[in-house]
Image (cartoon, helix red, strand yellow):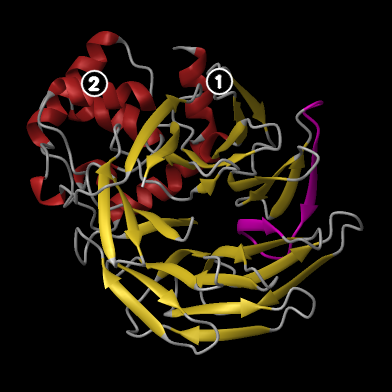
Amino acid sequence: MSKTLIIALSSFVAFAVYNAAAQASGVRELPEAPGKTLIETKCTSCHSIGTIARAAGYSSEEQWLHLISTMIELPEDEAKVVATYLSEHVPEDVSRRPTLVAGDTAIEIKEWITPTLGQRTRDPIEAPDGSIWWTGMWASLAGRLDPETGEMKEYPLPPTARPHSILPDADGNIWYTGNSNATIGKLDPATGEVKEYATEAGDPHTAVFHPNGKLYFTAQRAGMLGRLDPESGQLTEIETRARPYGIKVGPDGSLWVAYNGTNALSKMDPDSMEVTYFDVPDERTRIRRLDLDSKGMVWFVNSSLGKVGRLDPSTGEIKQWDSPSGEKSHPYSLAVIDDAVWYNESAMRPDALVRFDPATETFQSWAIPSGVGIIRHTWVTRTGDLLIHQTSSNRVGVVKILEQ
């Protein structure tokens, strides 16, 4: 067994109980055929059989072989058996092809596969020196990419941290949310030293630095919002509505939060941490990510209803538009670049990147080249490019916007 595979498998032992529960709770099983036992042995180290059974799939062995190679290192003969089985029993679900819309904006997408397979690469950011960083959530690591040379280096974090997202500070330190060990952590890339701050919330999720120098974060399962003062180490946490998710700083310094457990957005005062809620129409609404434009308008993805929306904080008015691929497209990440809204349709295969122009109320969309893995969070670089990733296939990428 290779070192890469050993690292990947050892990082995921904690998920055995979860996977067993998922399979025991009515998850669809794979049919009996040569290769099923091998899949049950190898693939469930990282995810449940249900993940495979519900996948959009591929109809060719070559496509399956390529995807497998980004997840786990298998002997050639075993990979062939797995790919043959999957191409026959998990073919492409054509109903999940995205509805792509042509337009005048030209982009260029470049992707890199990260070194440790199975790490679930996600949430890339740009550091002050121009390097791109990501978190390998399931392998408890942070990685650095030099986009000019393609050179990558990975930094181990505490094994129980399972960092959900990361962000840089002005000095080049990398901060992360310890989603499994209830910490906020700081990595010094120069030394590899990690400092942790314990939180009351069990699952710090997404964080952002405020101009006041403090770090604010959401804790989804705990239903909490938090503030950490890196200078003093003082931590303040408050309860909020169900499943707070994305968090952003607005032009006026207010903090805006998306909720994945109720139909709401909220505005939080950075000093008092007083929260004001804005209900979004339809109780089925669930919001993962949000961002603000130059006028202070709050843009958000209505993930559960397949829409992109805008809140005017001054009036409370909310307007929403249907995403090109429809109600089941599950918009996920979101970022505003030059007042245009960029997001992805995560339920589509391939994963579709969408641009919405508020001025003309028109859409344009592209298929992500690798197409499998889901963009869960994006980052706008200093030059106005968009950092993306594909979680399942362990890729980090950059979208260069060439013309619009």
Q: Is residue 296 above or below residue 209?
A: below
- Amino acid type, residue under disc 2 in the picture: Leu
Q: Which residue is mark 2?
A: 65
Residue 203: percent from left, percent from top:
61, 58
Q: Is residue 299 above or below residue 175?
A: below
Q: Residue at x 18, y 30 (%)?
A: 36
Residue 390 highlighted magenta (yes or no):
no
Side (left or right) of 249 relative to 297? right
Q: Which of these two is toward me, 118 or 372?
A: 372
* Mark 2 residue crowding within 10 angstroms, few (<14) / some (14–19) / many (20+): some
Residue 82: percent from left, percent from top:
21, 23
Q: Which residue is mark 1?
A: 148
* Magenta residue span: 190-209
Q: Residue at x 36, y 47 (%)?
A: 404
Q: Residue at x 49, y 41 (%)?
A: 385
Specify the quadrant of the image occupied by residue 332: bottom left
Q: Residue at x 61, y 86 (%)?
A: 276
Residue 303: percent from left, percent from top:
34, 65
Residue 196 highlighted magenta (yes or no):
yes
Q: Quadrant of the N terminus?
A: top left
Residue most toward the top? 76
Residue 179: percent from left, percent from top:
60, 52
Q: CA distance from mark 1 to mark 2?
A: 29 Å
- Amino acid type, residue under disc 1 in the picture: Glu
Residue 159 can be seen in this image: yes
